[in-house]
Structures are given as structure tokens and as C-alpha cells.
Amino acid sequence: MAAATRPASADSGAFSPLKARLSATKWQVMRYCNAFSGAALFGLGLLSGLSGAYALDARTLDKNATPTEAFRLGFNAYKQGDKTTAIEALTYAAEKGHAAAQWKLGRMYAEGDGLAKDDMKAFEMFSEIADGHADDNPDGSSARFVANAFVELGSYYREGIPNSAIKPDFGRARQMFAYAASYFGDPEAQLNLARMYYEGEGGDPDPRQAVRWAKLAATKGNVRAQALLGHMLFEGEGVGREPVLGLMYLNVARDRSQGADPWIQRLQEQAFSVATETERRTALALSDDWMAKHGGRDQASAQ
């Protein structure tokens, strides 16, 4: 059989993981965020369901408005293409600690959407969320925004921000991902944590931990986690080799990614080429069953 090949990163063509302890405590995470106080939910519809009748008109922002009212006004204005009103209302809500408003402004800064692109300001917004909402109920309405703020911070620490005080720091990146992965159970954070353990970013590679976190994310329907888990199961990295189950996950990930991540197709084709005929048939039957039961949608994104 061909030697195991490390998968390419979902972001830049190569997987990258981290080594800090998964039991990173809140005070450690907050210390790093506060040091620079004032990264993809990637337009996945987390704000859907917030439209409707609100107490504020799109042209009025009463100084006595609640943060939630201001956020809803800003969200409606954004949907209608009025980004000036949206920014005013979201800023009002964000200054009063509204996590979703802070997150939306952070994304707008990160993407240059209605605001001049500024990764440092985005970083500061996400840091405010982490600083003020780390203990929010993981099942509450703000949890997805808070978890993603930690993921964004992890990505910034992992890559650094050019011409700023934020330099690449795998240890801090791992702590951000670990907090969102463990406390909030966020699948994107779990994938990033698995990748860092797999590559040994921030320490020695730890395939057992990589499998553990990839499996948690894959179970929630994260496509890239399914591909990484499938590759490791097929090659026997970090676990006993399970070629049928590994190839099943690779088949599912290939079909669901629909060519968006070429590295997934390469891994699937590599595994398929060396699998036995029996392994291929069994894995195809299992992947067909999985697709029939779950469909092609990325469940983690749809939640």
C-alpha cells in the first residue's frame, strides 16, 4: 500500500493543528484576548429567523432602545441594503455588549463589507465577544456567535495579522479552538483542533487526539472533518486501521464537497485506488446509506 499522505489544508492546501491542553481554562483564554482588547460562520444563515416586526423603524434609533432592538434594526437594515443604518444600529448594540451585533460588525470588518476591511478591528470585535460572553449558555441563542468568535480568534492567532501586534502563535490558536470545541461543542473549532493535532502545530503531532476531535466534528456533519477522519481511519493513523469505514467517510466527504475542496477528492481517489474490491463495494454501500439518511447538506452549518 502507498505510504500515508498528509491531507492538504482546507484553507491553504495543508492541514494544520495545535498542541495546547484541551482543558484550557477560561482565564487563560481571556488573558490572551485582553492583551489585545480594542475569524469561517461564513454567511451560513445564523442570522436567519430574526426578521419580522420590530419596535424600531429603520430611520429611528431611540437612545433608549435595548441592545436587542438595535440589533434587529441593524439586521433588517443590512438585509435591505442600508448598510449605513445597519452599521449605526449594530454599533449601538455592540457597545452595549450584544454578542450577535459584535460578531456581525467583526465579520463586516473582516470582509470589508460596508466598512473598510480591517482585520485588527475585526480581531478586537471578536475579542470583546470572548471577553464578555465566554460563559454564555452553550445552548443559548448567542452560543453560535460566541463560539465562532473564538474560532475567528484562533485563526488570527494561527496566521497572524500583518503589520500588527498579532503574530502567529500556535499555542494561543490552540487554546481558542479548544475552548470553542470543548465548551460550545463547535464543529468548526473541533475540526481546527484536529488539524492542529494532526500536523503538530504548537507541539508534536498527536494522531490519537486528531482522530478524537475529527470524529466529533464529523459526527455533526462537518465535511472536512469527515475527510480527515476518513483518511486517518483508512491509513490507520492514531487508531487501528479501518479501511471500509475510512473509505466510507472519504466517499461521503467527496460527494458532499462537490469539488469545492480538491484535496478531498485526491484523498478519496488515493484510498479508492489501493482498496480491495470488497472494501470498495462495502464502503460504497455504506456511503450510499449515509447520504440517503442525512442528505448532502453540511449539517453542522445548517444547525
Image (cartoon, rainbow, N blue to C red):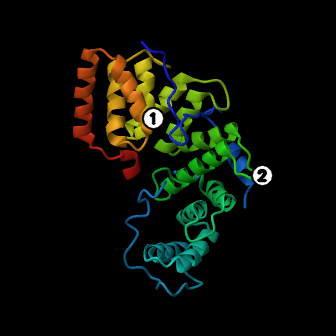
Q: Which mark is residue 99?
A: none
Q: Earlier in the sequence, mark 1 or mark 2?
A: 2
Secondary structure, mark 2, is loop
User: Which residue is depicted at the point 61% across and 58% down?
Assistant: 129
- Give the quadrant of residue 291: top left
- Give the quadrant of residue 216: top left
Q: Which mark is residue 165?
A: 2
Residue 7 in view, yes or no: yes
> In the rendered image, which quarter contains the N terminus?
top left
Disc 1 to disc 2: CB gap under 8 Å: no
User: Mark 2 Cα within 10 Å, few/some/many (few <14, many 20+)?
Assistant: few
Q: Is residue 152 above or below residue 20?
A: below
From the top left corner, tell me how far across and down residue 188 is, in percent. Answer: 49, 44
The amino acid type of the residue labelled 1 equals: Trp
Residue 26 in view, yes or no: no
User: Which residue is depicted at the point 42% across and 79% down?
Assistant: 54
- Disc tally is 2
Q: Is residue 241 above or below residue 148?
A: above
The amino acid type of the residue labelled 2 equals: Ala
Q: Nearer the viewer, residue 296 or 90?
A: 296
Secondary structure, mark 1, is helix
User: Mark 1 Cα within 10 Å, few/some/many (few <14, many 20+)?
Assistant: some
User: Which residue is depicted at the point 49% across and 79% down?
Assistant: 82
Q: Which mark is residue 263?
A: 1
From the top left corner, tell me how far across and down residue 268 is, in percent. Answer: 37, 28
From the top left corner, tell me how far across and down residue 46 is, in percent. Answer: 43, 59
- Circle 1 or circle 2, nearest the eye: 1
Q: Is residue 44 above or below residue 178?
A: below
Q: Is residue 189 above or below residue 125?
A: above
From the top left corner, tell me how far across and down residue 45 is, in percent. Answer: 41, 60
- Give the quadrant of residue 174: top right
Q: What's the distance in space between the residues labelled 1 and 2, CA to CA?
A: 33 Å
